[in-house]
Amino acid sequence: MAAPREIIWQLEPHSRAKHEILRRYLQAWMVILSQGRFPEILYIDGFAGPGEYSGGEIGSPIIALDIALGYRPPLETVIHFLFVEKEAERAAHLRELVARRTLPSNFRVIVEGGITFEDAFERRHSEYVRQGRLMPTFAFIDPFGWTGAPFSLVRKILEQKSCEVFVNFMYEEINRFIGHRDQVENFENFFGTNTWKSCVDLIDRRHRNRCLHDLCLGQLNNVARYVRSFEMSNSHDVTDYFLFYATNELLGLKKMKEAMWRVDESGEFRFSDATDPHQLVLFEKTPNLPTLQAHILANCSGRNIDVGEIESFVLVQTAFRESHYKGILKDLENKGRLRIVHGAAGRRIGTFGDAKLIVRID
């Protein structure tokens, strides 16, 4: 989608699905951090837009704000919101929407207009630093193209403890312009490296797609412990964009996967986990458990292994949720392919709630 020229514009189906993922994830993120040891947290929307669409649907900054306002009992943590919108008129529209809401004293909302995400972050960065560290942060980075969100800024956020990013990689737009000579500097800033040039000459559409995807994945893996990518394809099976989620917290990865598996299918677009080209998995209402079983058998068979390690493998190394594997273990036990090596007395057959339970799969 090209950048619109209007102040507000029509909500596209792909944005609706993306916002649903964001909504579901933030519902968990805000509660987890506000109930933890963090007195302050920060939500950043680096390309906030006007806050609503022409049909009255709310945009990503208002989604985040309304989620925080909707909790009962109310959240007590101080929540900072930094909304950045380069177009001044859109930023003014967003301010109006924020002003219509009654904000509690622990909500601190700043709308930066007329400057880039990079400039706004540098301007406000010191306000969000406590004892030399950036406060726990979730940054939603959703540009129309590839400018204004250099990888150096993404790295700066992820290098901080309890900070994570959700980045929209506009593949269709980037693929169209990546060969233009006047964009070389912009792409080097965006990717944080000049190795993107190796993708330009790839004629095969699938190879170029994977090359650009893997470049982003590799860059994020250099600064974050857990990285997953999600591909959105349209009804013609053409990649529209990739969403990259990067975090150093296992619980964050767990909650993002939960959000992805709960996205309702619109029929116009489809999501798949694109992290590993050998494990492409479509997010559907019913997960493809035979695929997960094949992964478990390939990686966990023939040795004594505790259930906690199996869960960690499923969560970190596959597209599936931690809740998907227990039915598979139950089925393997019923078929005599899994036996208990060491476990608690009185365990009921087919139950795997004890992470220390040691099993052997043959």
Image: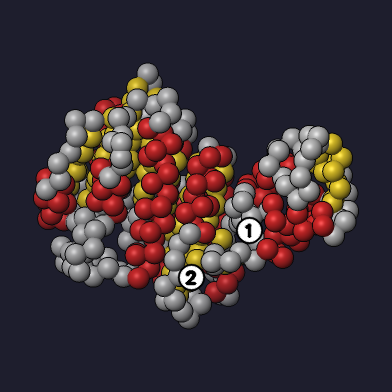
Residue at the bottom extreme of this rendering: 236
Left or right relative to 45: residue 361: right
Residue at image position (57%, 72%) is 206
Question: Which residue is the site of mark 2?
Answer: 270
Dividing the image into 4 quarters, which one contains the N terminus?
Answer: bottom left
Q: Is residue 13 left or right of residue 101?
A: right
Disc 2 is placed on an element classified as strand
List x then y, in percent, for residue 314: 67, 50
* Residue at the image point whose x is 21% and y is 59% from the top: 52
Using the numbered discs, state the Cα–Cα distance from disc 2 to disc 1 in whole angstroms.
Answer: 17 Å
**First along the sequence among labels 2 and 1:** 2
Residue 277 drawn at (x, y percent): 64, 63
Check the image and report above or below for 273 versus 110. below
Query: What residue is at 61 percent from the left and 56 percent from the top?
Result: 319
For discs 2 and 1, the disc positioned in front in the rendered view: 2
* Residue in the foreground of this view, choosing between 88 and 10: 10
Q: Residues within 10 Å of mark 1 (few under 14, many from 20)?
A: some
Residue 196 seen in this snapshot: no
In the rendered view, tell whether residue 117 sits above or below residue 123: below
Q: Is residue 87 left or right of residue 299?
A: left
Return the x and y of residue 293 as percentages of the image width and height: 74, 60
* Coloring basis for residues: secondary structure
Q: Vertical placement of 54 versus 121: above or below? A: below
Residue placed under numbered mark 1 in the picture: 276
Amino acid of disc 1: Asp
**Residue 157, percent from left and from top:** 41, 37
